[in-house]
Amino acid sequence: MSARTRLYTAAALLLLMAVTRVGHFGSDVSLPDASLAVFLLGGLWLGTWVWFAAGIALAVVIDVSLAKTAAEAAWCLTPAYWGLLPTYATLWLAGRWLARQPARPLTHAAAILGVVALTAVSLAFLISNLTFWAFSGMFGDMTATAYLASVARYYPSYLAGAGLYLALIGLVRAALAHRRSAATV
């Protein structure tokens, strides 16, 4: 990927995260948060930790700015907030692993992406929820097992949101690649 393409890709991913993360804290925006997909694809396409840091910085700026206007955001900005670092790093590293894989036929590549995305998003769910349980100070004597049982109902939407963006971005990317190859024929 050329430096210019990498810059455009980074801008598009960060913009997608910014537009959808606003709804993360109870605004009227109804789109699911794209942050999970953005960090996985960032690891896959952007690679360097500089872009990871840019994504983290953007997430923090958005969350802190929303905390001033949304009561729901203040609930999330606890001592457990640092848990987003390992959560998003898990996704970034999964993307980096995918980037190092040899080229495969499209169906094999899509299947590998699906398995890696499912695994990484599941780990991200566990990391973010367990750090929130352990460090937010909001759960007293509640055990980790009881907490995970109480948040398990959010797992399907957590997966679905990431899967939706990964599928849509994959389709757009495939369509653009097809268009480029048709134009060169």
Image (cartoon, rainbow, N blue to C red):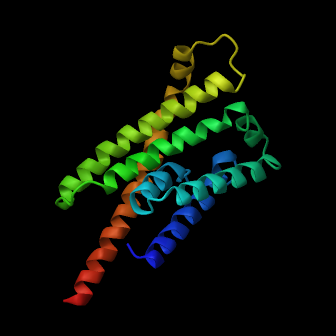
Residue 58 image-quadrant placement: bottom right
Q: Residue at x 52, y 22 (%)?
A: 148
Q: Does the image show residue 177?
A: yes
Residue 31 % position (x, y): 56, 55
- Which quarter of the rendering shows the N terminus? bottom left
- Left or right of 112, for residue 60: right
Residue 37 % position (x, y): 46, 52
- Left or right of 109, for residue 116: right
Q: Residue at x 40, y 76 (%)?
A: 2
Residue 78 image-quadrant placement: top right
**Foreground: 106 or 160?**
106
Q: Which residue is farthest left? A: 105
Q: Image height check: is 51 above or below 146? A: below
Q: Residue at x 54, y 55 (%)?
A: 52
Q: Which residue is farthest right? A: 68
- Left or right of 116, for residue 71: right
Residue 141 % position (x, y): 66, 10
